[in-house]
Amino acid sequence: MDRFESFEDGLTALLPRLRRFAHTLSRNPADADDLTQATIERALRSQAQWEARTRLDSWLYRIMRNLWIDTVRSRGRREDLHSPVEEAERIGEDPRSAIEASIDLKKAMSAMQRLPEEQREVVALILIEGFGYRECSEILGLPIGTVSSRLVRGRTALLQMMGNPDGE
Amino acid sequence: MVNDETFFAWLDGELDAHEAASVEAEVAAAPRLSAMAAEHRAMQAKLKGAFDTVIESPVPQHLAASVTAQPQAQVIDFAKAKIRRQGAWPSAAQWSAMAATLAVGVLIGTLAPQARQVSPVEVQGGKIYAASALNEALSKQLASAPGGDVRIGLTFRDQSGAVCRSFADASSSGLACREGNGWRVRGLFAAPEGLGGNYRMAAGMDPNLAALVDSSMAGEPFDAAQEKAARDKGWR
């Protein structure tokens, strides 16, 4: 059962990074930890599908991203009341850890929420999670050219938001 | 003039040495590009720094604990089975027994001619496909049919557009997707201990199979009319 244990060890070791990725996608820290929890559960149920020679991190990021897309779609059907910006501005209401609700993280999450989903995930994987363009394209199942053009649009929009006090 | 995609690919270290040197020279000669590079580097550092506070904060206990939560049913791990291929395996067994003993992926290749029951799966080029009665049921049977030993559950398309169908017999359940003219088995799960002959998909799908279906499905499962139409078109 060595392989089974190393899968769990690998998952545990990757939890901090998975949480960070969840925060880049989500509207608030509570949603981010819910997404992380769902990712852990699906990874454990699906571990037979993971091929041991492939990167565990890419596989887990893909699971998280797909769960996130599912969440966004079902949320889109259920509630159209809150725009992403309104949601992002509610981050500060989260009563939990001071670090998670820190002003920089709040601003960064708010800025990320203003990006369209398709740009946000590319920005998150490349600029924050440190994946290369090719790894990113494999995780998202997109051509590299698409990744590259979404990244240009996303980071250009972010620069305007983060460099401009009115945009924060 | 370097285009945006190339400029940022250079900034992200994605260009080969030759291309990078060329962009580097262009940026060095153009104050506007140098300023743009500096602005974007600063923005990325600020953004990453903000999200890095998540990495620096402790992982909540409930998340760490959930990693060690055990799945409810035993998963048949084809990869593990493959590794053990050289080992000693029983020469023949019924499908149910195979599933229960995790030997599925291995037995197919080594089934002795005297096996009384024909194997429901076969290996072609390292992939596991449905055979005989399972293949027959997947190709012809509708979920509404009373059917024989094999019952069909959900039919749907996966993210690649292939038609997939979940199935079950008395002691195991699984998922197979159309590949070429066959059904490639994506997963096969033993029913939890003790449910044996009473196991019915309608009473609740195996949680591992449910997860596999969930992670494979694109859109909604077929309704009865869609299922029949898909069958009439040869599951394309």
Image: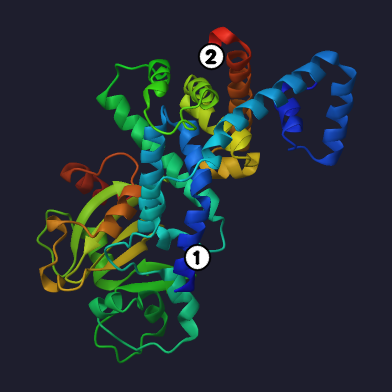
Badge 1 amino acid: Ser
Q: Position of residue B9 (x, y in %)?
A: 72, 32
> In the rendered image, which quarter contains the N terminus of chain B?
top right
**Mark closer to the chain start, 1 or 2:** 1
Q: Position of residue A125 (x, y in %)?
A: 57, 37
Disc 1 crowd rating (10 Å Cα; few below 14, some 14-19, many 20+) is few
Badge 2 amino acid: Glu
Q: Position of residue B10 (x, y in %)?
A: 76, 32
Q: Is residue B157 left or right of residue A124?
A: left
Q: Nearer the viewer, residue B102 or B121?
A: B102
Q: Quadrant of residue B49?
A: top right
At a point 54% along the width and 51% down the height, the residue shown is A57
Question: Is any part of residue B134 visible from this angle?
Answer: yes
Q: Residue furthest bottom?
A: B114
At a point 36% along the width and 45% down the height, the residue shown is A38
Q: Chain of mark 1?
A: A
Q: Residue furthest top?
A: A166
Residue annotated with mark 1: A6
**Residues flagged by tags 1 and 2 on a common chain:** yes
Q: Quadrant of residue A89?
A: top left
At a point 41% along the width and 43% down the height, the residue shown is A36
- Above/below status of B186 relative to B215: below
Q: Is residue A161 left or right of residue B209?
A: right
As helix, strand or loop, the secondary structure at mark 1 comes to: helix
Residue annotated with mark 2: A168
At a point 48% along the width and 72% down the height, the residue shown is A2
Q: Chain of mark 2?
A: A
Question: Is any part of residue B158 visible from this angle?
Answer: no
Q: Position of residue B78 (x, y in %)?
A: 42, 70
C-alpha distance separating marks 1 and 2: 42 Å
As helix, strand or loop, the secondary structure at mark 2 comes to: loop
Q: Nearer the viewer, residue B122 or B212?
A: B212
